Structure formats: C-alpha cells, structure tokens
Image: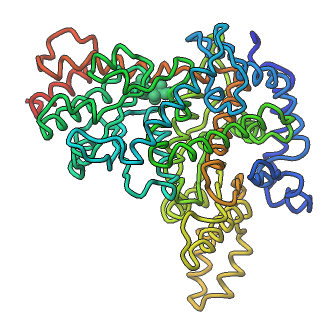
Amino acid sequence: MNTLISHTPIWAKLKTHQQYIAQQHLRDLFALDPKRFEKFSIETEGFLLDYSKNYITDETVNLLLKLAKKVQLEEAINRLFSGAKVNNTEQRAALHTALRNRSNTPIKVDGKDIMPDINKVLVKMQQFTDKVRNREWRGYTGKPIESIVNIGIGGSDLGPAMVTKALKSYHHPRLKAYFVSNVDATHLNNTLATLDPETTLFIIASKTFTTQETLLNAHSARRWLIKHLGDQQAVAKHFVAISTAKQKVIEFGIDPINMFEFWDWVGGRYSLWSAIGLPIAVMIGMDKFEELLDGAHKLDQHFKNTELANNLPVLLALLEVWYSSFFGVKTQAILPYDYSLELFPAYLQQLAMESLGKRVTREGKNIDYPTCPIIWGSAGNNGQHAFYQLLHQGTQLIPADFIIAIDSQNDLNGHQDAVLSNALAQTHALMMGRSANQTQLQILKQEDKNLEQLINQVPHRVFMGDQPSNSLVYQKLTPSILGKLIALYEHKVFVESVCWNLNPFDQWGVELGKQVANMLLPALSSQRDTNINLGVDSSTIGLLKYIFKGSLS
Ligand code: G6Q
C-alpha cells in the first residue's frame, strides 16, 4: 500500500472516536451497559477472553474491524499460510504454521511441497528423543544421558526455554534440562559445575551457526567435555546440532547424522515448532511435543477460518493497535497468573518487539504513527509486590494482559484460590479505582486514628482506576493449551504488522549488534590497541581504553 494507513478516512474516524472514548471512565462504560461482559467476551478454543475492561464500545469495535478490512487482513492471512514470500526484505516465506500443519496438506515453497521434509525431521526427532529417554543413547563411557544442555540464544533459546519450563510437570523423571545463552562465562561455568560430563548431552541450537555467543559457548563446552573424558571421539556421543547450515555444523566437528535440520523460511523467534524444539521433545516426549503442535495447529485453523469479529488474535491485535496508535500507549504488561508461565513475558518481549519494533513500512517508507509498545511483565503475584504500585497510582496508561489458569500444575490446599482471587482483584481494582469520597468513607469507617492525619492521607490513597486489561482464562496449562497460547500471540503480532504495514519477519537491528560486536572483537581479543582504526566514536574508544588499563590515567 502506498498511502500510509494514517492518511486514510478510517484512521481519521478512529482518531475522532478516540477523543470521545478518552473522556469516559471504564467504570462508567460498565455502568451504562449491564451486558458489557457478555458483549465483549468470547469463549473459544479452550479460552475465555474477557476484553470488556477496555476503552471500547460497539462503535470502537466496528471501526477497528473496518480498519482490518481496509488493510486487507483476510488476504494477508491467506498469504501467510500459503507460503508466499511475506518476509519481503529477505525474500522468504514465514511458514512456522507449516511446522505444525497436522493435517499434512501440501504447502509449497518455490513450487516444492515442504511437508515431506518437515515430517522427516519429526521422525528423526522421535527416534532421537526415544533413545535418550529410554537409556539407549549412551555417552562415551556407556552411561545413559541424564542432563541436556541447550546452547543457543535469542530465538534459539527463549522459546524452547519458556516451553520446557512451562511443561515441567510433563518432564521425564530422570532427565534435567539446562539452557545456556549468555556469553558471560558465568552462565556456562555455573551450569557445568553441576553436571557430570559422562551423562551430559549438549544441543547446539543456531539457525545460522555463526552467532558469536553460541559458538563461543559451544567451543568451551566441547573443551570441557574432552578435558574430562580425555578423548576427542567423545564429542560424537555428547553433541548434537540444530541448524540450517550443514557445512558449518560439520566444520564445528558434529557429524551430520547428529544434526537436525530446519529451513530459512523458519524465523528464529518462530522456530520452537521446528527441530529447535528438540530440548522440549526430549524432556516431555515426542507425543506431548506433538500435542503442543496440535494445539498450535488448532489455533491456526481458528485464525484462518474465523470471522474477524470473533477471531482471538485479531481482537487482541486490534486492541493493541487502538492503544498504541491512538492513545499513544508506550508499554503493555503481560501478567501470567500461572507460575509455569514465568518466562512467557520474556519470550513475548522478543516475539513482539523484534517483529514490530520497526519504523518503515514494508515498502521502506517512514511511518508517522507509533507502533509496538514495550512489552514487559512477570508472574502475577510477584509483580503485585513490586511494580503494580505504578499501575495503580502512576501517571501512565498501561494496558495489561492477565493470563489466568483455573488450575495450577500443582495443587496445595488453598494456594490456587489465593492465585485466582488476586488475579480477579487486580483486574477489578485497576479498572474501578477508588474515588476520594469512597476513600474518605472507607478510612474513616475502618481506622481509629488521628482524624487530621487520615484526611491528609486521602489524596495518597485515591486510585484513579481506568487501567484497561484483558483476561485470558483457561482450565490448565497442557501442551495443547500452551501451543494454542503461543500461536495466539504469534498471530496477534502478525495482525498488528498488517495494520501497521510492517514486515514482522526481519530483524536488522539484531544483525547490526552482531556486526558491530564482530568489528570490536579484534581490538579486545588480542591487540588491545585502540590506535587501530576501529571507525567508532570517542566515547567507545574511551571505554575501550578504560577496559584495557582499568583506569583513565
Ligand atoms: C530471532 C532473531 C534472533 C536469533 C538469534 C540467534 O528471530 O533472528 O534472536 O534467533 O540471534 O540466531 P542463530 O539461531 O542463528 O544463532
């Protein structure tokens, strides 16, 4: 599209409508419409999405759906699933949906059906995971594997780490999983310190097999193994790789028999469904890994086939577009009231911010509207005792997603009632707030203190409320529900990218970091010489000098 979406009549209508809605308090919208919850909630695919606590009316939803039509969302969804090169800057398809295409219908990339290759890798993963789990895969000294260490970073770490942690109750009782991503030797060393080399298997996960952090960690892990087992031959029994770059895997010294392949049409942050999910599959078993894929596939079908007005990813995305582009909201909180999802906010941070942190359209034109908010958050109750204060009484509008499990993975008397009461109390309190009158009445009724002091406290104990939130509720976090949850947010990000006309599948910002680090590495690793022409600013040179000498003098 050549005209920016912000220069269309529907955008102008939404802007005008925003001025009206911004004057309403959420509690007034509730007071005006007793059927608000029924109207703005939807139960489907094992979820209840309650989006009634948002700055919306029927008119808002209608206008947002018109925006979706204007950007030809349905056509864009079809293109995504069809294998078209939707990643236009890299001329690649983005086919994470094919990796979980459980109906196995043919999907073509450059005229070739990719399903047979996908299925072949799934079979290889099945054979490998069975061997590790059944004690058939033996280490160099003949002992069965007890620990797996995934070495990868970014998309080759966050997704598998999040899912592995979330599904802990499905783990094989003998096996333990570790994830090493940071290049600071502390991460690897602290992990290795707890491990027995004879029973440890390293999974080197890197799409490109060129990532500095991953390769350094992988080389150090290999040295550690050889040092302890005393033989280079041990590597074959203790290292496998997941990559698109076969030759580089061979150069590292891993036999291609022990390599699990994936393809350039799988984006890093969308790759947990591919062989990058191997640590998940080892820990929970291939049947459960397939349940994760099945769940995601069901959500894919929902996304593809459900009318926009009842489509979960579409609704979540339109709300975020509404807040970011029309209310100028800068951040969004992700608050799982399910401890198993502790790593979900960090995972989503990459998914959304790497996909939508862009400032030009797909055609390379500068945009003039705000896009992706900063995504942050942490597991529910912990956040309440830390940053929720700012949500309740700070000065910023911060929409939040409350992700709520009715049942926990673990059951202790009274615990889950406490989790649920806190979750519901927070969404309620953030929306309703508490006026000065209410505050006065309450504190005068309840407390036997100095009257003057109490009156002085009133402004400090008033809550404006009016903080919007979604509640996404499910029974229990099974592999299938988790698959659906992840796919839901992936597609939400995709819908936003269509509304904002961004390419969500490239990440030039990540590439820049990799390039600059590689440029500075020689100065740090050997020469320790800042006189060589590094082509960097005086501040960076100053920092380097300080690092070399430990002082500026
Ligand atoms: C994800 C990004 C990025 C990538 C890492 C690791 O979408 O591209 O986070 O996953 O930089 O890259 P490799 O898998 O190639 O090591």
Locate residue 301 relative to residue 212 in the image: left or right. right
Figure label count? 0
The answer, for residue 260, to whether it is visible in the render is yes
From this view, report whether residue 39 is shown above or below residue 417.
above
State the image quarter where residue 224 is shown: top left
Q: In the image, residue 85 lies at what x, y percent? A: 65, 13
Rendering quadrant holding ligand 1: top left
The answer, for residue 459, to whether it is visible in the render is no
State the image quarter where residue 363 is shown: top right
Q: Which residue is at a point 59% across and 55% down the rendered structure image?
A: 336
Q: Which residue is at a point 80% across and 54% down the rendered structure image?
A: 52
Quarter containing the N terminus: top right
From this view, report whether residue 494 is shown above or below residue 26.
above
- Camera-side residue of 175 and 343: 175
Q: Which residue is at a point 20% across and 24% down the rendered structure image?
A: 542
Locate residue 445 relative to residue 121 in the image: left or right. right
Quarter containing the C terminus: top left
Q: In the image, residue 422 lies at what x, y percent? A: 62, 69
Q: In the image, residue 474 lies at what x, y percent? A: 70, 57
From this view, report whether residue 314 is shown above or below residue 56.
above
Q: Which residue is at a point 72% across and 18% down the rendered structure image?
A: 82
Q: In the image, residue 144 lies at what x, y percent? A: 30, 47
